[in-house]
Image: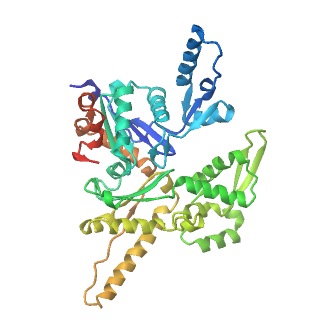
Amino acid sequence: MDPATARPAVVIDNGTGYTKMGFAGNVEPCFIVPTVVAVNESFVNQPRPRSTKGSNWLAQHSAGVMADLDFCIGEEALARSKSSSTYNLSYPIKHGQVENWDAMERFWQQCIFNYLRCDPEDHYFLLTESPLTAPESREYTGEIMFETFNVPGLYIAVQPVLALAAGYTTSKCEMTGVVVDVGDGATHVVPVADGYVIGSSIKSIPISGKDVTRFIQQLMRERGEHVPPEDSFEVARKVKEMYCYTCSDIVKEFNKHDKEPAKYIKQWRGTKPKTGAPYSCDVGYERFLGPEVFFNPEIYSSDFSTPLPDVIDKCIQSAPIDTRRALYKNVVLSGGSTMFKDFHRRLQRDLKKIVDARVLASDARLGGQQKAQPVEVNVVSHPIQRYAVWFGGSVLASTPEFFTACHTKAEYEECGASICRTNPVFKGMY
């Protein structure tokens, strides 16, 4: 028996904004860190010496080694880049896709050795990917994991399937549903039928958590709040996480704020990073206008104007007809940007309106001879949805079947990185 199968698998969910990591079998990830790497560029940008004597190659080699070693990730990376100009920030994942593989490799290195403090040769690994990831990206991931970290086994799972597999909806795990995954850098609406992703019906929209943050930043700037410019994005992000909520009627909400400002307007207090002087600012309309971006996107940008409920409806309508009722019945939320108060209620109400209007229209067409069966719409919300993908990975990697489904080091050495294109559970090519 492989000794690595006796140890819990490592589960790492790499998102655009945050990475969740921990061991299979746990209910929560051990660490949630921003997906960012800070590299000390002072070694890389050293001027080359004029003389070419033998000692200089050693100096250059040492500088190269130090550049490889002197980097950090997460909150530490953000703090270093603020305190020192020699550290350059690199965000390896953009819009759900890995764009900088060197930075990604360094990021995984710190995750494994500094945070989880485990030997990668002793554990199987479960990594996650966005639903629209190219097969080549899976190959790169396999190469890094097998070549650099020498892992005994690897499984690359699609994020929305894991969110569904989290099984937190009912006591029995329902593997048919629509996953609305709203992360920091990408929003996907993915229909899944019996564990299979319906690839042709996946919808992706260009509005995500980062856009909500930018919109709040823009609103505060336009109102003339005294937030230091270098700190404004970070303040907007914290305001979003602490104070934002979803309203049922935007006009009523404006009236409420105008009638009782003392009740609804919150105060944000901070200190200026450069001088250390304290400052404060009001948090008003942006509390409900931020999340409203998903339901009325035109208030933020004229480039995209389809509300999220319409996108979900179009996604389900493009799926095979025999799956549609089951899909409407199980709309599962996943990702930190679905955590706004009452987000699921507003989404369910707006989606139900669209579906009911369609049923009424079909009744009218039939002239009342036949009545269409009402369609049940159910949007599932749960406190664990912030890391539903990670939790689903933890559940999956705890099952005995997981180890048989993984790609092993021996398979990789025999067949190469192309094995990572295949999903071993369904034996299907991506």
Q: Is 133 placed left or right of 250 in the picture? A: left
Q: Is residue 18 above or below residue 62?
A: below
Measured as percent of width and height from the top left, residue 155 is found at 31, 38
Q: Is residue 64 above or below residue 255?
A: above
Q: Is residue 292 above or below residue 139?
A: below
Q: Nearer the viewer, residue 338 or 65?
A: 65
Measured as percent of width and height from the top left, residue 250 is found at 59, 71
Count of all numbered marks drawn on residues in the image: 0
Measured as percent of width and height from the top left, residue 385 is found at 43, 52
Q: Is 25 placed left or right of 93 in the picture? A: left
Residue at far top of view: 54
Q: Quadrant of residue 303?
A: bottom right
Q: Quadrant of residue 273?
A: top right
Q: Is 348 placed left or right of 50 in the picture? A: left
What's the coloring here? rainbow
Look at the image and tell me whether residue 25 can be seen. Answer: no
Q: In the picture, which quadrant includes the N terminus? A: top left
Q: Is 33 placed left or right of 323 in the picture? A: right
Measured as percent of width and height from the top left, residue 30 is found at 45, 36
Look at the image and tell me whether residue 268 can be seen. Answer: yes
Q: Residue at x 48, y 29 (%)?
A: 110
